[in-house]
Amino acid sequence: MLDSPSQLKSQIYTGKFHPHEYFWIKYQPFLLRRGYDLRPRYKPGWAPTWHKLGESIERLYRFEDALTPKKEGLLDAVRLSDNRKVVLKRVETSREELPIGLYLSSESLSHDPRNNAVPILDVMLLPDDDSFALIVMPLLFPFHALPFRRVGEFSNAMKQYTQFNLMVDATDLLPQGWHFLRPHTHNGIDDWTEWRERSTCRSLRYYFIDFGLSRRYLDNKKILDVGSFGQDQSYPERSDLVPYDPFKTDIYQLGNVILETIEVRTLLLHNFSDTQY
């Protein structure tokens, strides 16, 4: 049974770790040797900052080291060679996610302008368990978290979304940066004080992420498949018995993303005053 938010908060306040955090504590020395620095919470000898300062539980989330990942096997880090913020993801080596990601990041495809798949920057097999690997990707930003204010901004995103992208490289959008666990903040605590309009960022790039539910088909013949694909399970042809065209499923699901962006996300525009831009 999942802990309630209040129970989880109490556990964090006492300095306890969530069970899935022990993976990162265990491999922190290995990752440091490979050139990736985890947040202070996962380093040897860590002690809660709020204990040192005698702060109450009500102020817990004013401390960056109180933030815990919501998803198992996914965490941010800093690449020490260039201080770049990256994301580490644990993947099973027996599944197709890793080979598909490496294929799309290959030398030949990485230079294809139609390929907006998130690049894999590095792959590390776990030193004591080769059934899992860690892939390294750039830290990206939820594409819908900032409103579209101009038709051209939305058009640019949709042109790239027709190539299946769901995140954006917001390096130019958010000069102060953003926190992996709290994207609405630049340091995990304080909200951004400024951000740039999309139309002023000429090289804004949208990306498709997460190949955990993907499959690769090795020929161009008529392709049919069975089973459930993607997070949107509302597509009508879904069947475990009757073969159907999985690419039409992609189009259906992408269309729903675009509709949601038009009908819901862009309505956020009306909730922003001019003083916030």
Image (cartoon, grey):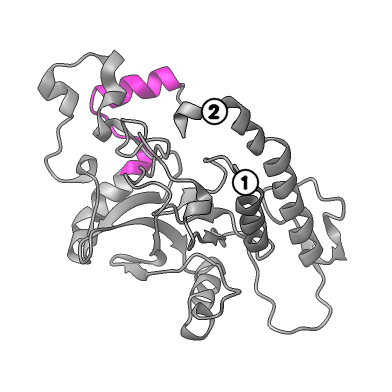
Say which of 153 and 77 sits in front.
153
Q: Is residue 195 above or below residue 108?
A: above
Question: Which residue lies at the image location 42% right of the left edge and 40% below the top edge?
Answer: 183
The type of residue carrying mark 2 is: Phe
Q: Which residue is mark 1?
A: 150
Residue 39 makes an appearance in the image: yes
> Tag 1 or tag 2, which sits nearer the N-term?
1
Marks 2 and 1 in Cβ contact (< 8 Å): no
The type of residue carrying mark 1 is: Arg
Q: Secondary structure at mark 1?
A: loop
Question: Mark 2: few, some, or many residues within 10 Å (few <14, many ≥20)?
Answer: few
Residue 2 makes an appearance in the image: no
Residue 248 x %, y %: 81, 63
Question: Which residue lies at the image location 44% right of the left edge and 45% below the top edge?
Answer: 196
Residue 17 magenta-drawn?
A: yes
Q: Which residue is mark 2?
A: 272
Q: Range of the magenta residues?
A: 5-21
